[in-house]
Image (cartoon, helix red, strand yellow):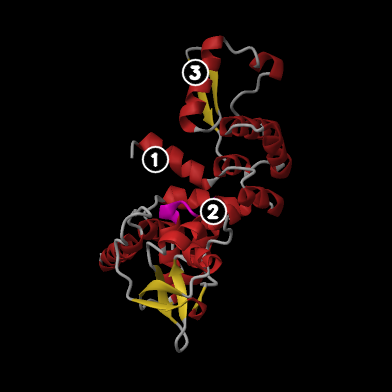
Amino acid sequence: MVEDVSKKRLGRGLAALIGEIDQPASAQTAPTVSADRFVPIEHVSRNPRNPRRSFDPADLEDLSRSIRQHGIVQPVMVRTGDVGRYEIIAGERRWRAAQMAGLVEIPVIVRDVDDKTALEIAIVENVQRADLNALEEAQGYEQLIAQYGYTQNDLGEVIGKSRSHVANSLRLLKLPDEVRNMLAEGALSAGHARAIVSTSDPIGLAKLIADRGLSVRDAERLAQKDADQSSKPQGLDTKPASQSATKDADTVALERSLSDVLGLNVALVHKGQGGQIRIDYKSLEQLDEICRLLGGK
């Protein structure tokens, strides 16, 4: 109970810190949060543990033009480092754009936090702003789990996401490097990547999806086709393939409807007045979701 309360307090504390720098503000309005101080920009350095790795050059250029005209509207959150030095907790994009704009000093909010909290804040801030691509988000989660012993449930509470969201994000790290690069570059969406992560040929399917501009639903159909070809049901339907393929239209429509609801392949086998229903899953996370739906929780 004490541990649960501590987690909730940590989550609220992080939300409060992020709230200080996440207030929307237009270029014409004054900053919603006063800076603690202005510091020389060369005394500020990036956080090497920041989960965000990619910064779009065009976006940085747009922001730098705004900064040249209006200055930095929202201060950069930092923590103290060596004497006279500061390390960014949140706001690396603003810091980079300020360098491009030629600023000598930048406004900062100074917070005294440890490595773990700094990483948590960086992840939460970027997730709230949707600044991380799906792969960066997953790598940030993995870093917190590996370095600080978080469970998926703990992490979900801290960052304000469900356990299943964390689990699905982490699954992306199982993809081959080539597919992960396509995801990071935007050639694939997170939905595409999640659909093919457990297939027999994720690289081939990723290229097919990107080349043809297929939707996520198309990717899910390809993945299901791959699953059907690579595994055969055992103990459910022993009819020859030609006989099984002659299901009536109502059965096929019901299978399709159930598959759409669950996001998984569903097969119905009629035997007289009864029959069997088969739901294929390819991960423990999918099994958890099935149990949750069947249990009504």
Q: Nearer the viewer, residue 29 or 32?
A: 29
Q: Is residue 127 left or right of residue 191?
A: left
Q: Is residue 289 above or below residue 218?
A: below
Question: In the structure shown, which secondary structural element does the residue marked by tag 1 occupy?
Answer: helix
Q: Please give the residue where the numbered disc 2 appears in the rendered image.
A: 59
Can the viewer see residue 196 in this picture? yes
Q: Nearer the viewer, residue 43 or 177?
A: 43
Give, as a single range, the part of the protein colored magenta: 127-133
Q: Is residue 16 left or right of residue 153?
A: left
Amino acid found under the numbered disc labelled 1: Arg
Q: Nearer the viewer, residue 44 or 148?
A: 44
Q: Quadrant of residue 267?
A: top right
Q: Are marks 1 and 2 in contact (CB under 8 Å)?
A: no
Q: Please give the residue where the numbered disc 1 appears in the rendered image.
A: 292
Q: Earlier in the sequence, mark 3 or mark 2?
A: 2
**Residue 254 screen position, x and y as percent:** 49, 18
Q: Is residue 159 above or below residue 44?
A: above
The residues bearing labels 1 and 2 have C-alpha atoms spaced at a distance of: 41 Å
Mark 1 or mark 2, whichever is nearer to me: 2
The residues bearing labels 3 and 1 have C-alpha atoms spaced at a distance of: 21 Å
The residue at the point 37 percent across, 63 percent down is 74
**Residue 25 screen position, x and y as percent:** 34, 54
Q: Is residue 124 above or below residue 235?
A: below
Amino acid found under the numbered disc labelled 2: Asp
The residue at the point 58 percent across, 58 percent down is 54
The residues bearing labels 3 and 2 have C-alpha atoms spaced at a distance of: 47 Å
Q: Please give the residue where the numbered disc 3 appears in the rendered image.
A: 254
Q: Residues within 10 Å of mark 2 (few under 14, many from 20)?
A: few
